Image (cartoon, rainbow, N blue to C red):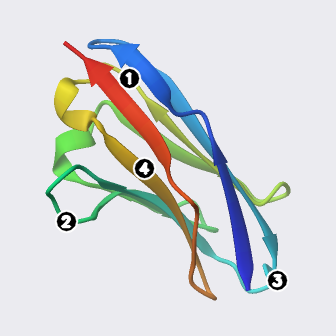
């Protein structure tokens, strides 16, 4: 199993920035993909950004140009730098890793208007 520990969420005003971090441990020898999903109240969980060990990234359209995902392979850690945050970015953000599939416990991001 993969264990994921997230940090970096919090409350920020619109236009502000946050950096989320997620460190993986456990059965990580095959790990090649890490990313972030989010779930707002009353909505389905959606992919925010994902990166593989080769550096290929993918973002949901709503965060393109505002967020950057990066991965430190040596530290098995993925980061999500979020800039120009909007109230609609408010959600619980979950770290994801595979294989094997693992989920973090979630970290709250709240953007006030």
Quadrant location, the C terminus: top left
Q: Viewer-nearest of labels 2 and 3?
A: 2
- In terms of image quadrants, where is residue 73? bottom right
Name the residue: 22% across, 24% down: 86
Looking at the picture, does residue 100 appear above or below residue 25? Answer: below
Do the numbered discs 2 and 1 sit on residues whose CB atoms are within 8 Å? no
Q: Would you say 54 lies left or right of 30 here?
A: left
Residue density around tag 4, few if under 14, some if 14–19, many if 20 or more, within 10 Å: many
Q: Give the residue number, with chain letter if any, for mark 1.
A: 83
Q: Give the residue number, with chain letter if any, for mark 4.
A: 93
Q: Earlier in the sequence, mark 2 or mark 3?
A: 3
Residue 28 at x, y percent in the picture? 78, 79
Q: Viewer-nearest of labels 4 and 3?
A: 4
The label number, if any, that marks residue 29 in the structure image: 3
Give the CA distance from mark 1 to mark 4: 15 Å
Residue 106 at x, y percent in the picture? 51, 54
Give the CA distance from mark 4 to mark 3: 24 Å
Residue 111 at x, y percent in the picture? 30, 23
Looking at the picture, does residue 69 appear above or below residue 17? Answer: below
Give the CA distance from mark 2 to mark 1: 23 Å
Q: Earlier in the sequence, mark 1 or mark 3?
A: 3
Helix, strand or loop for disc 3: loop
Do the numbered discs 1 and 3 sit on residues whose CB atoms are within 8 Å? no
Quadrant location, the N terminus: bottom right
Helix, strand or loop for disc 1: loop
The label number, if any, that marks residue 63 in the structure image: none
Q: Between 7 and 76, which is closer to the camera in this rendering?
A: 7
Q: Viewer-nearest of labels 1 and 4?
A: 4
Q: Viewer-nearest of labels 2 and 1?
A: 2
Helix, strand or loop for disc 2: loop
Q: Give the residue number, with chain letter if any, for mark 2.
A: 44
Helix, strand or loop for disc 4: strand
């Amino acid at each position: 199993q993969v264990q994921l520990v997230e940090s970096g969420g919090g409350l920020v005003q619109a236009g502000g920035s946050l950096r989320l971090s997620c460190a993986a441990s456990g059965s990580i020898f095959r790990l090649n993909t890490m990313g972030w999903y989010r779930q707002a109240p009353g909505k389905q969980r959606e992919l925010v950004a994902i990166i593989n060990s080769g550096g290929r990234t993918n973002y949901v359209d709503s965060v393109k140009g505002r967020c950057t995902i990066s991965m430190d392979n040596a530290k098995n850690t993925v980061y999500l730098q979020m800039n120009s945050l909007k109230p609609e970015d408010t959600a619980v953000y979950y770290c994801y890793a595979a294989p094997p599939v693992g989920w973090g416990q979630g970290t709250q991001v709240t953007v006030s208007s």
